[in-house]
Amino acid sequence: MMHKHEKIWLILSTAMIVGFFLFAGYQTFALQMGPPSHQETIDPQKVDETEPFDNPGVFQTGENEYEVVMTLQIFSFTPSEIEIPAGSEVTFTMTSKDVTHGFQIAGTNVNAMVMPGYVQKITQTFNEPGEYLILCNEYCGSGHQLMATTITVK
Ligand code: CUA
């Protein structure tokens, strides 16, 4: 026969596991907080010839909206100079030309992996003027720690 306390803990822990699953399912499907699906693919050998990456840069797409089309490669970000007005919503559309890189903006929640063969998109609103440091946070080779750039928000 099972001890009474044992039974209570078994029920409680089972309920917790079921609860976590339900919560994760709710976040993913109801709140659409699932991880990026990486549906958009690209031939990593032909990034320079493939739109929009044939023309990387900063583009205004709305009143307070910008798109930054960016390629990541050993050991740099293109474009390297990004300047946007404060209050802008910026969508970064990125891909890698070689190995897996990271895209982290210090002081924000932006933190993404950028893999060859895939298009990564991430949106961030910059309300505070200043210089934001962009770092590669995936080890990508001997120059990894030098792979950084800045965004200037004016
Ligand atoms: Cu790119 Cu580390």
Image (cartoon, rainbow, N blue to C red):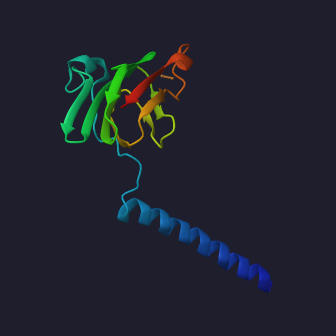
Position of the C terminus, as image quadrant, is top left
Please provide percent x and percent y for residue 73. 40, 18
Q: Residue at x 36, y 65 (%)?
A: 30
Query: Which residue is found at the position 73% from the left and 82% from the top?
Result: 7
Q: Is residue 152 left or right of residue 4?
A: left
Q: Quadrant of residue 15?
A: bottom right
Residue positioned 35% across, 20% down in the render = 81
Relative depth, front residue between 154 and 104: 154
Tell me the quadrant of the picture where the N terminus can be found.
bottom right
Compared with residue 114, is residue 3 higher up or lower down, i.e. above or below?
Answer: below
State which quadrant residue 52 falls in: top left
* 144 lies left or right of 63: right
> Where is residue 65 shown, x and y percent of the image?
25, 40
Q: Residue 72, can we see it? A: yes
Q: Is residue 78 above or below residue 8?
A: above
Residue 50 rendering spot, x and y as whole percentages: 21, 23
Q: Is residue 117 visible?
A: no
Q: Position of residue 78 (x, y in %)?
A: 34, 19
Residue 109 vs residue 9, the one in the foreground: 109
Is 5 placed above or below 148 here? below
